[in-house]
Image (spheres, rainbow, N blue to C red):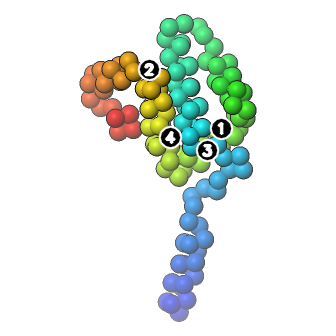
Amino acid sequence: MKKYLFIIFSLLMLSCSQLIDPPKNLIPKDKMSEIVAEFAMNDQINTYVPGSNLENATRMALKQRKIKPADFIDSYKYYTATGDLENILNDAQEIILAKDPAAKDYIEKKLKENKNTPPLVK
């Protein structure tokens, strides 16, 4: 009886190997990194131009790449559940640093100021 329970339990574990199924319109990781990098840069615009509409900038970034907001949200949830989001965010940070090398000094300065920075940023 124990053998049968073990076999059934093993089959159940193998059939449920993924926490979440990939969405129908999954955005590739490299494209996701580009979008996240653009969102971060748009967020900084609000610092220099107070009152700028971040929601419109976000919509425009998605519209330029012909991505529906629901597809972005589903892909974001999927990458969060699979643990790939950290790699996507690191790639996005590399994209930002490639576009603006001065950002590296700013990031290092902020890391020194805030000793309790989450590991994802480091």
Q: Is residue 14 above or below residue 26?
A: below
Q: Which residue is mark 2?
A: 100
Q: In x, y percent, where is residue 12?
A: 58, 74
Name which of mark 2 and mark 4 comes first in the sequence. 4
Residue 21 falls in which quadrant of the image?
A: bottom right
Name which of mark 2 and mark 1 comes first in the sequence. 1
The quadrant in which the C terminus is found is top left
Mark 2 to mark 1 CA distance (whole Å): 25 Å
Q: Is residue 16 left or right of residue 60?
A: left
Q: In x, y percent, where is residue 19?
A: 57, 58
Mark 3 to mark 1 CA distance (whole Å): 10 Å
| Outermost residue to the bottom | 1
Q: Is residue 29 left or right of residue 93?
A: right
The amino acid type of the residue labelled 4 equals Ile
Name which of mark 2 and mark 3 comes first in the sequence. 3
Q: In x, y percent, where is residue 115?
A: 26, 29
Q: Is residue 89 above or below residue 63?
A: below
Q: Is residue 12 left or right of residue 25?
A: left
Instruction: Please report contact status of discs 4 and 3: CB closer than 8 Å, yes or no.
Output: no
Mark 2 to mark 3 CA distance (whole Å): 24 Å
Q: Which residue is mark 4?
A: 88
* Mark 3, secondary structure of its residue: loop
* Mark 4, secondary structure of its residue: helix
Q: Which residue is mark 1?
A: 72
Name which of mark 4 and mark 3 comes first in the sequence. 3
Q: Which residue is mark 3?
A: 28
> In percent of the image, x 56 and y 65: which residue is there?
17
The amino acid type of the residue labelled 3 equals Pro
> In percent of the image, x 69 and y 22: which residue is there?
60
1 vs 4, front mark: 4
Instruction: Please report contact status of discs 2 and 4: CB closer than 8 Å, yes or no.
Output: no
